[in-house]
Image (cartoon, grey):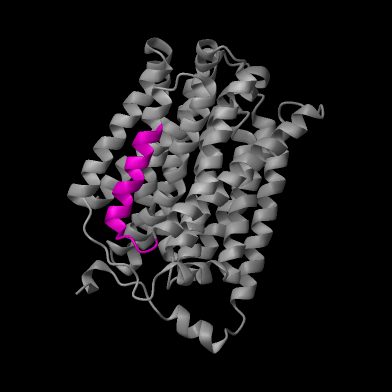
């Protein structure tokens, strides 16, 4: 792993830890701040709102900022947000801290993906982006369980202080290890907005919203499914979530080389496999070992969709990819919120704890249909101006100067 990619992966590890750790700390936060667990659940939504708003906003504001400096500034904001969360005196101020911590999430991954792709040869760009995302997946194996235990024994504030410390380490690593990456020759906010209006970029974002919602329709209720249906004790939930994280890591490792070799087939295959595994999970959830094996596979095929979707929007917004890349993470968080909501609707309707699996399968199939439609449209002859725009390749580091 090139050292600059390691610096980006460390940053992704910190971001992934703070994003998912709140789910395990809700009872502790609710007890400490005198609120209910369902009300404390708004803290998860607050972070997602920060991501959705911050991804396009901060990317647009920083469209002319050198990318290395932008990455350091985004991690500085991330650090401040987690520090504010740790020191929050009330529930309202903690909500504000979570929104602040979420603001740089999408912009960081958007800019970071562009930087990672510039650091390697053309045929290894997807592997470089997947390497950065490994930090996010490893956070679910190590960061979230350890941070949850820390919060349970030393208080939830200690968790966010540690995450803020990771943010400081990530800032130093980026400043020391990541080289200067030049802005696009014809970059700027107008160029970025123009690329975002591309039909293929919009279809890619829509694929992310529906396809990835299939993952979160189940993941949001995975703990309840494992205890209420499969029969695991609550103390085993951390292990189940770690297995899901292992699957995510395996999916990220596989997605990089597969996407470099065949982007759209990888996207089609991962979405189809996601739908099939979700249907299968409706059966295997009743058997402990089968359920655990399916959780690993679900994490793998679910996360395999992220790299081809990321590369798709970057390729189609090739002359100005940063805003499209960041907006992809807004789409993922909309998928998070939408999938969780639809899964909850199915449970509330009395369809049972396993109903989110079939809801998720339906969402994955919708995402697959959108992806196939986009692929068919992409085969149509392009306008001359579109050909010129798409021929502006992204310069690699070897071409700088």
Query: Can you tell which quarter of the image residue 38 is in?
Result: top right
Q: Quadrant of the C terminus?
A: bottom left
Q: Residue furthest bottom?
A: 384
Establish if 389 lies above or below 109.
Answer: below
Residue found at x 36% / y 28%: 83
Percent x, y of residue 227: 62, 18
Residue at left 23%, top 53%? Answer: 178
Q: Does the segment drawn in magenta span residue 79?
A: yes
Residue range in magenta is: 63-81
In this orientation, which residue lies closer to the viewer: 306 or 43? Answer: 43
User: For this view, does 114 lie left or right of residue 263?
Assistant: left
Look at the image and tell me whether residue 142 can be seen: no
Residue sitting at x 55%, y 34%: 46
Q: Is residue 385 left or right of residue 131?
A: right
x and y percentages locating residue 313 in the rendered image: 50, 63
The answer to if 199 sits in the magenta stretch is no
Q: How many marks are shown on the rendered structure?
A: 0
Quarter occupied by residue 229: top right
Q: Position of residue 193 (x, y in %)?
A: 51, 67
The percent coordinates of residue 210 (x first, y second) are 65, 51
Say which of 129 and 179 sits in front: 179
**In front of the other: 119 or 241:** 119
Answer whether residue 134 is visible to the viewer in this image. yes
Could you tell whether 277 is left or right of 349 in the image?
A: left
Residue plotted at (28% across, 50% down)? 5
Image height of 95 relative to 256, above or below:
above
Magenta: predominant secondary structure element? Answer: helix
Query: Camera-side residue: 347 or 388?
Result: 388
Above or below residue 43? Residue 56 is below
């Amino acid at each position: 792993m090139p050292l600059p990619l390691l610096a980006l992966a460390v940053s992704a590890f910190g971001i992934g830890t703070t994003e998912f750790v709140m789910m395990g700390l809700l009872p502790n936060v609710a007890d400490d701040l005198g609120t209910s667990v369902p009300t404390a659940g708004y803290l998860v939504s607050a972070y997602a709102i920060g991501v959705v708003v911050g991804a396009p906003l901060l990317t647009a504001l920083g469209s002319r900022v050198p990318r290395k400096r932008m990455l350091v500034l985004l991690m500085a904001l991330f650090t401040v947000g987690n520090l504010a969360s740790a020191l929050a005196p009330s529930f309202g101020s903690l909500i504000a801290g979570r929104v602040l911590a979420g603001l740089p999430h999408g912009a960081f991954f958007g800019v970071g993906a562009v930087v990672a792709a510039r650091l390697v040869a053309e045929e290894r760009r997807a592997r470089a982006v997947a390497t950065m995302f490994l930090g996010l997946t490893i956070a679910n194996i190590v960061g979230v369980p350890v941070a949850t235990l820390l919060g349970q024994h030393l208080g939830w504030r200690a968790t966010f202080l540690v995450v803020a410390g990771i943010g400081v380490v990530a800032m130093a690593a980026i400043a020391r290890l990541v080289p200067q990456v030049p802005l696009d020759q014809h970059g700027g906010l107008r160029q970025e907005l123009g690329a975002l209006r591309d039909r293929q970029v919009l279809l890619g974002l829509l694929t992310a919203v529906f396809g990835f919602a299939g993952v979160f329709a189940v993941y949001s209720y995975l703990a309840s499914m494992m205890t209420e249906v499969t029969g695991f004790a609550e103390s085993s939930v951390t292990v189940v979530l770690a297995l899901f994280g292992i699957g995510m890591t395996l999916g990220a490792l596989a997605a990089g080389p597969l996407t470099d070799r065949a982007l759209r087939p990888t996207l089609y295959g991962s979405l189809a496999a996601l739908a099939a595994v979700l249907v299968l999970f409706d059966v295997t959830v009743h058997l402990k070992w089968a359920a655990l094996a399916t959780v690993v596979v679900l994490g793998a095929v679910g996360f395999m969709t992220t790299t081809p979707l990321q590369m798709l929007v970057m390729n189609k917004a090739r002359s100005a990819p940063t805003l499209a890349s960041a907006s992809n993470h807004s789409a993922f968080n909309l998928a998070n919120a939408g999938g969780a909501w639809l899964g909850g609707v199915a449970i509330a309707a009395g369809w049972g704890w396993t109903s989110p699996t079939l809801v998720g399968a339906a969402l994955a199939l919708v995402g697959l249909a959108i992806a196939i439609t986009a692929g068919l449209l992409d085969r149509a002859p392009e306008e001359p101006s579109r050909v010129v725009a798409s021929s502006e390749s992204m310069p690699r580091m070897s071409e700088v100067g």
